[in-house]
């Protein structure tokens, strides 16, 4: 592909390599290192003048360092006369801080959007934003790609009784996501209403819908401590579900989440590779990984060629 450069940040080099391989290009040369005082230094190792540049950096690992590294890489390419700089951010950082939910609370997702714009980004490609209104925080184009087509294909290939399953949202906020998946598979859906004591501690759960004797597929955009999905699984099994699968776009898996999954009654926990998952999959046999590099690579190819990306909302690239 002429006039295109793909650079990978240090958050998820494996995904950047898969995307570059899919596009048939080599990853651009970039050196990132720290000064002795922990300041980030970035050196772009090849010319980007007049090029269409894509920088792949996910919001995982050392999030604050990785955000700073991304901002510096964008700015370095911009002042080196790149024609366009696109930030490919599979997991958008600080996406859960998207509204003022109590007095004096910051809207940090908006702050991140401002920083990306000021650093010189011309376009953002991301996947399954926690709240789709985050797109409105930007004054530059944002393509929010969905993992749903790839996930639906996994369900059809790996869940034997998927035609009689029930798609369940572990909270009321995910109702729209769950109804879209249920419509795609032409199955029923239900949801769980939860009340929280604190931001990562659930007090009680109420199931709205009937799951008796059926395979249940829990669908959510991300799982951090996995407390919600493990409690939801316990509630669903207690309500008569025959088996429970969990499907999550972003498996952050912090703290003791992996041991919680091992101890839970879930059959499988399916995550995409927007976050590195190899170690988690080795540690827990219940975790299955859906590769979304082909979707992001196709989004980059279509953006570079000036084609519509809406095809990806309903199809998985071959």
Image (cartoon, rainbow, N blue to C red):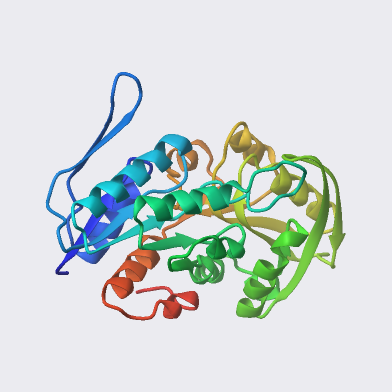
- The quarter of the picture where residue 131 lies is bottom right
Judge left or right: residue 97 versus residue 126: right
Judge left or right: residue 59 versus residue 228: left
Q: Evaluate whether residue 4 shows in this view.
A: yes
**Residue 145: x %, y % from top left:** 47, 67
Q: Evaluate whether residue 91 shows in this view.
A: no
Identify the residue at image location x=83%, y=58%: 240
Viewer-side residue, 97 vs 300: 97
The total of numbered circles placed on residues is: 0
Viewer-side residue, 36 vs 213: 36
Identify the residue at image location x=24%, y=65%: 23
Viewer-side residue, 94 vs 217: 94
- The quarter of the picture where residue 248 lies is bottom right
Judge left or right: residue 192 versus residue 18: right
* Residue furthest to the top: 36
**Residue 14: x %, y % from top left:** 32, 47
Q: Which quadrant would the N terminus be assigned to in this image?
A: bottom left
Judge left or right: residue 13 versus residue 214: left
Identify the residue at image location x=57%, y=40%: 253
- The quarter of the picture where residue 148 lies is bottom right
**Residue 185: x %, y % from top left:** 62, 77
**Residue 55: x %, y % from top left:** 31, 53
Q: Is residue 302 above or below residue 75?
A: below
Q: Which quadrant would the C terminus be assigned to in this image?
A: bottom left
């Amino acid at each position: 592909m002429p006039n295109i450069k793909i650079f990978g940040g240090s958050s998820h080099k494996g995904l950047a390599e898969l995307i570059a391989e899919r596009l048939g290009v080599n990853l651009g040369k970039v050196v990132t290192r720290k000064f002795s005082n922990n300041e980030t230094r970035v050196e772009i190792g090849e010319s980007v003048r007049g090029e269409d540049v894509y920088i792949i950096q996910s919001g995982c690992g050392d999030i604050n360092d990785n955000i700073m590294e991304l901002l510096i890489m964008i700015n370095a390419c911009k002042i080196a006369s790149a024609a366009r700089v696109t930030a490919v951010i599979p997991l958008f950082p600080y996406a859960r801080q998207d509204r003022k939910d109590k007095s004096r609370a910051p809207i940090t997702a908006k702050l991140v959007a401002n920083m990306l714009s000021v650093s010189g980004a011309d376009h953002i490609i991301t996947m399954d934003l926690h709240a789709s209104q985050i797109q409105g925080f930007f004054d530059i184009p944002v393509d929010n790609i969905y993992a749903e087509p790839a996930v639906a294909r996994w369900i059809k290939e790996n869940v034997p009784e998927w035609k009689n399953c029930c798609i369940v949202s572990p909270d009321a906020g995910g109702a729209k996501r769950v109804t879209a998946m249920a419509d795609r598979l032409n199955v029923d859906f239900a949801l769980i209403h939860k009340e929280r004591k604190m931001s990562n501690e659930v007090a009680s759960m109420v199931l709205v819908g009937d799951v008796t004797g059926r395979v249940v597929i829990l669908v959510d955009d991300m799982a951090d401590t996995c407390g919600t999905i493990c409690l939801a699984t316990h509630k669903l099994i207690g309500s008569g579900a025959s088996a429970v699968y969990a499907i999550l776009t972003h498996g952050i898996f912090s703290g003791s989440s992996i041991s919680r999954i091992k101890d839970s009654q879930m059959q499988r926990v399916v995550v995409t590779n927007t976050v590195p998952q190899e170690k988690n999959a080795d540690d827990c046999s219940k975790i299955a990984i859906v590769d979304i590099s082909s979707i992001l690579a196709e989004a980059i190819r279509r953006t570079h060629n000036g084609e519509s990306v809406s095809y990806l909302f309903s199809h998985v690239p071959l």
